[in-house]
Image: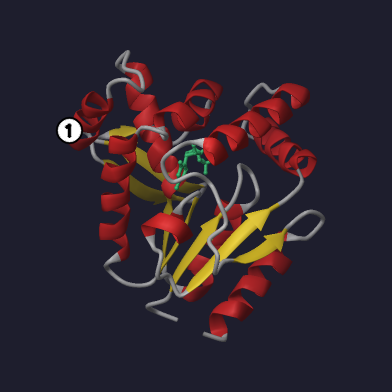
Amino acid sequence: MKNIRIAIDGPASSGKSTVAKLIAKDFDIIYLDTGAMYRVATYIALCNGLDDSDGAGIIRLLKENPIAFGHSPEGQLVYTGEVDVTHAIRQNDVTNAVSKISAVPEIRAYLVDVQREIASHGGIVMDGRDIGTVVLPDAELKIFLVASVEERAQRRYKENLQKGIDTDYDLLKFEISERDRKDSTRQVSPLKQASDAILIDTTGISIAEVVSTIEDYARKI
Ligand code: C5P
C-alpha cells in the first residue's frame, strides 16, 4: 500500500477531503489537498489586487511565497511563505473567487507541476477536480465522489457553523451549484469523471462506509 496513488475527484463538498485524510492515515501515505492550493492562489490574488487576467503575476507571488502544509491537533495547516492562511482560504471571498482563478491555464500548469512533484515521492491520496484526468492519469485507483447538492450544502453549512463562519443555507446551496457549474464547464481540465474512475454516491452514506469501500478497492489492487 506504501506506493499506491489514489485520485479522488468530485464536486464541491462531496466529502473528498474528509475521506482522503482518513485513507492517508490508515495507509500511512501522504494526503494532498489540491483545492487548498487553488485557494491559496486565489487568496494571494485578492490580497494583491490581481485578477484572472494576470496569471503570470499570481504565479510570481506563489513562487515568492510557496505553498506549504503543516499539522496541528486541529488538523491540516496551510501556509504561503511564512503566513498561516488555513482559515483565510476558507472564507467566502476566496470560495466565491476560486473558480475564476483556477480556470487560468498558466496557474493550473504551475500547480499541476508542483502536485506531480509531491506525488513523485511515494504513496499519496490526492483530492481535487482533475486528479484522475490530468494530474495522475495513471493513478492506481481513481474515485469520483458525488452527493446531492442538498446534502452537500447541509454538510458545508454544519461545517461553517462549527467554524464560526456566518452562513445562509440557501445562498450556500446556490454558491455550491455555481462553483460546480463553473468548474465543470471551464475550458482547461474541467471537473469530470475519468473513464476508469469508480463512481461513489455518498448521499446518505456515512464517512466510515465510504472510507472502507475505497480501502477495499485499494487492497484488491
Ligand atoms: O476542493 P475545494 O472545494 O477546496 O476546491 C476549491 C476550488 O479549487 C474548486 O472549486 C475548483 O475551482 C478548484 N480546484 C481545481 N482543481 C483541483 C482542485 C480544486 O480547479 N484539482
Position of the N terminus, as image quadrant, is bottom left
Residue 81 spot, x, y in % from top left: 24, 35
User: At x 54% / y 37%, what residue is drawn?
Assistant: 185
Residue 171 spot, x, y in % from top left: 72, 22
Residue named by callout 1:
64
Question: Is residue 141 visible from the viewing direction of this image?
Answer: yes
Q: Is residue 95 above or below residue 23?
A: above
SS under mark 1: helix
Location of residue 161 (image quadrant): top right
Note whether ligand 1 is within 8 Å of mark 1: no
User: At x 55% / y 52%, what residue is drawn?
Assistant: 17
Q: 22 or 56, which is in the foreground?
A: 56
Q: Is residue 50 above or below residue 137?
A: above
User: At x 74% / y 40%, what residue is drawn?
Assistant: 149
Q: Residue furthest top?
A: 49
Residue 128 spot, x, y in % from top left: 49, 50
Residue 84 spot, x, y in % from top left: 36, 34
Q: Residues within 10 Å of mark 1 (few under 14, many from 20)?
A: few
Location of residue 154 (image quadrant): top right
Q: Amino acid at mark 1?
A: Glu
